[in-house]
Amino acid sequence: MRRAVRVRVLVAGGLASALTMAAGGLAWAGKEDTTSGPQLAVVSYWQPGDYAKLPAGTLALVNPRSGIVGADASVVEQFRTAVATAHARGVRFLGYVPTGYGDRVSGHDNGQGSVGQSMDDIRGQIALYASTFGSDLEGIFFDETSQDCTSAATDYPQLSAATHAAGLTRSAMNPGWVGGDYCYVKAAQAGDIVVTYENDLAHYLASGPGEQQEGARLAHTHGAFTWNLVHSAKDTGGLSQALAALRERGPDYAYVTDVGGNWQAGEDTWGGAPSYWDAETGCLTGATCSAGG
């Protein structure tokens, strides 16, 4: 699926205040524990200064320029400083790397709004992230991953191995769904994360819980984890619906936004925090929550 525009924008003010009630969700404590619901994992194509709003225990992304190769050195330094500060508070980071939907011909127009990335291209991105962010970086978020079951079976292990070879500890793959016969979930390596949903709230609710529940179950059988990304969840009513559905489906990680996914119309889905940021973080970090049942 075509990913949302990766333009970094400043987050607007006026965020909703936290809702109050007993908490759901658990902050990260060195391992995944979703007995009270999924943990907060943010697709944060944000400006460096906005990382200050990320709560401790959150998994987030660093993405200087749709990756790090080719980014201006002064911009990268701003990200490096912001990541170090946030990590010292307990925020965990993955570096964003595009993978061209499995197209390994460097620079080739793959017809999906992106270009091919050779394994050398990808290893170069990983190495630069590792050398720039050091121990402040946990791993790599691979976007635009293979949309074919056969290639994913070889591609995912290669990408995961390249991450570990650079001294990082985990990978996240983003095919945006579970794949035919759950092939993307099955291809994920132990300790890694696979995004098994990236779409709007209406489709999330209409599709029912079964596919995501089975995806999470299969991932856990070989030590992998799942992540659901839900956009177009308007106002706190939409947030409440999304959180209830997430808890029913059982992903290990989750993020909800009120921004739409129509990148052709200029919607920057992951470019800033949703209007109900305080309410969402309260629910997914174990603080205070009245949304999501």
Image (cartoon, rainbow, N blue to C red):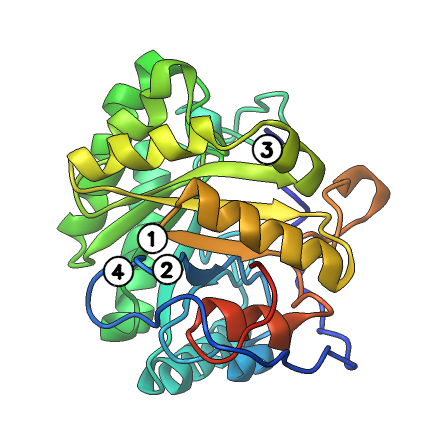
Q: Sequence-wise, which precedes: disc 3 or disc 1?
A: 3
Q: Residue at x 47, y 54 (%)?
A: 254
The reply, left or right, for residue 178 in relation to residue 223 is right
Judging from the image, what secondary structure is the residue with disc 1 in?
A: strand
Residue that label 4 marks: 33
Q: Residue at x 55, y 81 (%)?
A: 53
Mark 1 touching mark 2, by CB under 8 A? yes
Tell me the amino acid under the disc marked 3: Ser
- Closer to the chain start, of discs 1 and 4, is 4
Q: Nearer the N terminus, badge 1 or badge 2?
A: 2
Amino acid at dot 4:
Asp
Name the mark nearer the viewer: 3 or 1.
1
Pointers 4 and 3 in contact (C-beta within 8 Å): no
Disc 4 is placed on an element classified as loop
Q: Which mark is residue 198?
A: none
Q: Which mark is residue 94?
A: 2
**C-alpha separation, residue under disc 2 versus residue under disc 3:** 21 Å
Q: Quadrant of residue 120?
A: top left
Q: Nearer the viewer, mark 4 or mark 3?
A: 4
Amino acid found under the numbered disc labelled 2: Leu
Q: CA distance from mark 4 to mark 3?
A: 35 Å
